[in-house]
Image: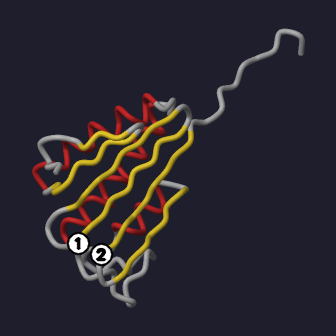
């Protein structure tokens, strides 16, 4: 069993179970490190980490008080899944920007603004938000050009 104190290690992936608000910063650091190891530029890694942070906070606030976060990185790709243990996202909630008068409700919208590749799977058994980012291809100049 894995807790927020120690990752569950599998080839290419690590899962931190039972993340609560005080543990979010530690997971954020792991995500940034994984994104940089995968080859994302620092700005891209930061943007990806902010998106993951929003998904974690949403899972904790709206999905039962804890989240399980799996981080995997390979050359050129980082993938993070955030799983909660709530009753799913209500049908009336959408990842659209709410009106300025509405308090809250911007988390999923922000996730989708900051990360191009996002999937949201929700059911009565909880929600899984999966985010992925690919390193931008490096541009090299060809002296023959």
Contact check, label 1 and label 2, Cβ < 8 Å: yes
Res 133 label: none
Please say if 105 is above or below 55: below
Task: Measure the C-alpha gap from mark 1 to mark 2.
Answer: 5 Å
Pick whichever, 114 or 38, lies toward us: 38
Q: Is residue 14 left or right of residue 79?
A: left
Q: Is residue 108 left or right of residue 138?
A: left
The image's colouring method is secondary structure
**Residue at x 13% of width, y 57% of height:** 20
**Residue at x 48% of width, y 60% of height:** 113
The image position of residue 105, as x and y in percent, is 31, 75
- Split into 4 quadrants, where in the image is the C terminus? top right
Q: Considering only order in the chain, which callout, 2 or 1, is on the residue closer to the N terminus?
A: 1
Please say if 13 is above or below 54: above
Secondary-structure class at tag 2:
strand
Pick whichever, 93 or 128, lies toward us: 128
Farthest-out residue, right: 145
- How many residues crowd mark 2 within 10 Å: few (<14), some (14–19), many (20+)? some
**Residue at x 54% of width, y 57% of height:** 117
Q: Which residue is mark 2?
A: 126
Please say if 37 is above or below 117: above
Q: Which residue is mark 1?
A: 85
Q: Is residue 140 left or right of residue 5?
A: right
Pick whichever, 70 or 101, lies toward us: 70
Farthest-out residue, top: 143
The image position of residue 84, as x and y in percent, is 26, 68
**Residue at x 14% of width, y 48% of height:** 4
The image position of residue 136, as x and y in percent, is 61, 36
Secondary-structure class at tag 1:
loop
Please say if 77 is above or below 109: above
Tell me the quarter of the picture where residue 9 sits: top left
- How many residues crowd mark 1 within 10 Å: few (<14), some (14–19), many (20+)? many
């Amino acid at each position: 069993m894995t807790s927020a104190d120690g990752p569950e290690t599998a080839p290419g992936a690590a899962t931190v179970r039972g993340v609560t608000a005080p543990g979010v910063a530690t997971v954020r650091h792991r995500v940034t490190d994984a994104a940089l190891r995968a080859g994302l530029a620092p700005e891209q890694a930061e943007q990806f980490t902010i998106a993951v942070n929003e998904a974690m906070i949403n899972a904790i606030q709206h999905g039962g008080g804890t989240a399980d976060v799996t981080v995997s990185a390979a050359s050129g790709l980082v993938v993070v899944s955030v799983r909660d243990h709530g009753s799913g996202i209500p049908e009336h909630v959408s990842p659209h920007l709410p009106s300025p008068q509405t308090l809250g409700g911007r988390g999923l919208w922000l996730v989708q603004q900051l990360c191009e590749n996002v999937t949201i799977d929700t059911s009565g058994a909880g929600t899984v938000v999966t985010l992925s980012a690919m390193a931008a291809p490096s541009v090299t100049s060809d002296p023959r050009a």
